[in-house]
Image: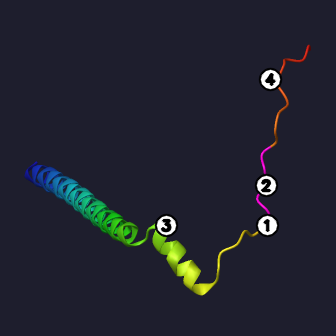
Amino acid sequence: MFAKIVVVILALGLCAAALLSLRQMRTQAAHELAEARLRVLQRDNELWRLRAQIAEHVTPEHIQELAAKLHPLKPVGGDAVQPPVLAGPIQDQPR
C-alpha cells in the first residue's frame, strides 16, 4: 500500500514538472516573439526616418538640376500628345 502511494506521488510530481517545463517553454517562446516584434518595429522606425531624410534632400528641382548637368532634357516620344478636342457636348446614344 505504501509503495502504491509513493508511486502515485512520484507520478504526480513528474506530471507537474513536465507541465511546468511546457509552461516555461511557452513563456520563453512568447518572450522571444515579443523581442522579434520589437526589433522589427525598431527597424521600421529607422527605415521611415531614413526615408524622411532622403525626402528632405531630394526635391524635383534638385533632380532637374542634376539631370540638366548631365544632358539637356527633351521628350522621350517626340512631340507631346494633345488631348482630343470635342466638337460639342456628348449626347447619349439610344440603346
**Mark 3 highlights which residue?**
60
Dots 1, 2 in contact, CB < 8 A? yes
User: What number is the disc on residue 81?
Assistant: 2
Above or below for 7 versus 92 = below
Q: Is residue 73 left or right of residue 25?
A: right
**Mark 1 highlights which residue?**
77
Q: Which residue: 82% across, 23% down?
A: 90
- Say whether disc 1 or disc 4 marks the residue closer to the N-terminus: 1
Above or below for 43 versus 69 = above
State the extent of the magenta-drawn residues as a range: 78-83
Three-letter code for the amino acid on which mark 3 is drawn:
Pro
Three-letter code for the amino acid on which mark 1 is drawn:
Gly
- Where residue 35 appears, as percent x and y from the top left, is 25, 64
Give the CA distance from mark 2 to mark 4.
Answer: 22 Å
Q: Is residue 54 left or right of residue 41?
A: right
- Where residue 66 appears, as percent x and y from the top left, is 52, 80
Give the CA distance from mark 1 to mark 4.
Answer: 31 Å
In front of the other: label 3 or label 4? 4
- Say whether disc 2 or disc 4 marks the residue closer to the N-terminus: 2
- Where residue 77 appears, as percent x and y from the top left, is 79, 66
Q: Residues within 10 Å of mark 4 (few under 14, many from 20)?
A: few
Q: Residues within 10 Å of mark 2 (few under 14, many from 20)?
A: few
- Residue, far top: 94
Give the CA distance from mark 1 to mark 3.
Answer: 21 Å
- Say whether disc 2 or disc 3 marks the residue closer to the N-terminus: 3
Three-letter code for the amino acid on which mark 4 is drawn:
Pro
Q: Residues within 10 Å of mark 3 (few under 14, many from 20)?
A: few
User: What number is the disc on residue 89?
Assistant: 4
